[in-house]
Image: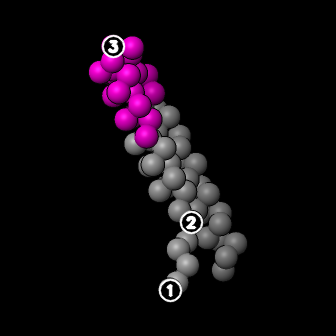
Amino acid sequence: MAARRFRPEGVAFGIGLLGLGVLATLANLGYVDLLRSIRLTWPLVLVIWGAAELYNTFTAGSAR
């Protein structure tokens, strides 16, 4: 069986999904306003995505 290549996008997606789940749970319990939280933190998704793309670009270039 071939080894799976590490993909930072998968990690970032997993962390984002986990964070969204935690926010949804806290919103259901009445501790946080979910829509306000998403409005304030959505740019972080773009930052993580961009960092993952840069990482892929630099690591793919050094593997050649």
* Secondary structure under the numbered disc 2 in the rendered image: loop
Q: Amino acid at mark 2?
A: Phe
Q: Amino acid at mark 3?
A: Gly
Q: Which of 4/58 is in front?
A: 4
Q: Quadrant for the C terminus, please.
A: bottom right
Q: Identify which residue is drawn at 50% across, 48% down.
A: 12
| Dot label at residue 33 | none
Badge 3 density bin: few <14, some 14–19, many ≥20, Cα 10 Å = few
Q: Is residue 33 visible?
A: no
Q: Is the Cβ of the residue at disc 1 closer than 8 Å to that at disc 3?
A: no
Expressed as whole percent of the image width and height from the top left, the position of residue 22 reads: 41, 31
| Dot label at residue 6 | 2
Expressed as whole percent of the image width and height from the top left, the position of residue 6 reads: 56, 66
Q: What residue is pinned by disc 3?
A: 30
Give the extent of the magenta segment: 18-41
Q: Which of 19/53 is in front?
A: 19
Mark nearest the camera among 2 and 1 is 1
Q: Identify which residue is drawn at 43% across, 40% down.
A: 18
- 47 left or right of 16 in image: right
User: Which quarter of the picture shows residue 63?
Assistant: bottom right
Mark nearer the N terminus (3 vs 2): 2
Badge 1 density bin: few <14, some 14–19, many ≥20, Cα 10 Å = few
Q: Amino acid at mark 1?
A: Met
Q: Is residue 24 magenta?
A: yes
Measured in 3D between alpha carbons, the distance from the residue under mark 3 to the one under mark 2, in whole angstroms, is: 37 Å
Q: Main secondary structure of the magenta part?
A: helix
Q: What residue is pinned by disc 1?
A: 1
